[in-house]
Amino acid sequence: MTSNDIAKQESARGETAAMLPPVDVVEDDSGITLYADLPGVPKDKLNVRVEADALTIEAEVSLPLAQGMEASYAEVQLPRYRRTFTLGQELDSDKAVAEFRNGVLRLHIPKAAHARPRRIEVQVG
Amino acid sequence: MFQTLFPGDLFAELDRMQRQMRQFTGPMTSIRGFGRSTYPALNVGGTPDSVEIYAFAPGLDPTTIVATIERGVLTLSGERRTELPVSDDARVRLDERFAGRFSRAVSLPDDADPDHVTANYADGVLHVSVKRRESAQRRRITID
C-alpha cells in the first residue's frame, strides 16, 4: 500500500492530520513495553485502545496559550498525535497496564501465558 | 492547509516549509543547529507584553532543566536518560525517542526583560514567558 492510498483511506474515514509520536518498544519474556512521547497532552485527552489486533494511540494537545498570542515560529504544528500498531496473537491486551507522566506514555502488554517461553525438560531414559 | 495548533500566519507556514526543504536538501542550517530530530521541539509566540516559548520536552524531571538568559538568548539544556533496559533478555524493537544531553537556544527580541521571566513544566511541555520591557510597550499618548 502506498502512502497515497493510506492518505485516501484516512480521509475516507474522516480522520484529520496528526503527528506521529516517536516510540520505543522493548520486548522481554514477560511481554512488550511501549514508551511514546506525547508532550502537551493532558491525561484526559489521551486515548489508548485495542481493536482486534490493532493498538491505537490517539491524543490531543492542549497548551495554555497566552491571550492574544501570535505565533512567530512553530516546530509543532498540529494539535494531535495518532499512531497504530499491529499486535500479535501472543499478547494479552486485556491485561495491559498504562501510565502517563510528563508527556510520556508507558504501556506494558503481557504475553499470554501460553506464549511465554518455557523450558522443556528432557528426559533421559 | 492543516488545522494548526498554533495561531500562525501564512508567512510562518511558508517559512516552515522552506526550512524543511533546506533540512533535507542542503547544508544551510542555522548556526545554532537544527537537526531532523530536534529535542525539545520549540514553538515561539508573542503578545503585546510578553514573549512565550513552549519547549516540547517530555519525560524530564523539571528540577534538572537548566534555563538561562544571556545577552538576549534563552538557552534550555538538560539531559534525558534512556529508559531502554540493559538486561540481556530484553530486545529493543523500536528505538525512536531522543536520549542524551540536549541544548537549544532562542534569540529573544530586544525588548525582552530577563528580570521578568516565569517558567512552568506541565504535561511534558516547558512554558517560558518573558515580559517585554514596559518602555517598549505600546501606550496611548494623551493629547491636551
Image (cartoon, grey):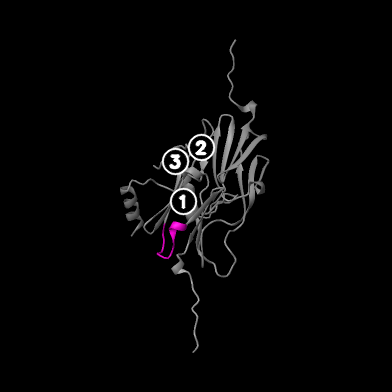
Residue A80 x/y as whole percent: 45, 45
Q: Secondary structure at mark 1?
A: helix
Q: Secondary structure at mark 3?
A: loop
Q: CA distance from mark 2 to mark 3?
A: 11 Å
Marks 3/1 same chain: yes
Q: Earlier in the sequence, mark 3 or mark 1?
A: 3
Q: Secondary structure at mark 2?
A: strand
Marks 2/3 same chain: no
Given the image, what chain letter belongs to the residue carrying mark 1? B
**Within-10-Å neighbours for mark 3: few <14, some 14–19, many 20+:** some
Residue bearing mark 1? B21
Residue at image x 44%, y 38%? B10
Label annotation for residue A71: 2
Question: Is residue B85 positioned above or below A100 on the image?
Answer: below
**Within-10-Å neighbours for mark 1: few <14, some 14–19, many 20+:** few
- In this rendering, position of residue A47 left or right of residue B30: left
Q: Nearer the viewer, residue A29 or B105?
A: A29
Q: CA distance from mark 1 to mark 2?
A: 21 Å
Q: Nearer the viewer, residue A38 or B128?
A: A38
The type of residue carrying mark 2 is: Ala
Residue at image x 57%, y 61%? B84
Residue bearing mark 3? B4
Of circles 2 and 3, the one toward us is 3
Q: Which residues are magenta?
A: A85-95
The type of residue carrying mark 1 is: Met
- In this rendering, position of residue B59 left or right of residue A59: right
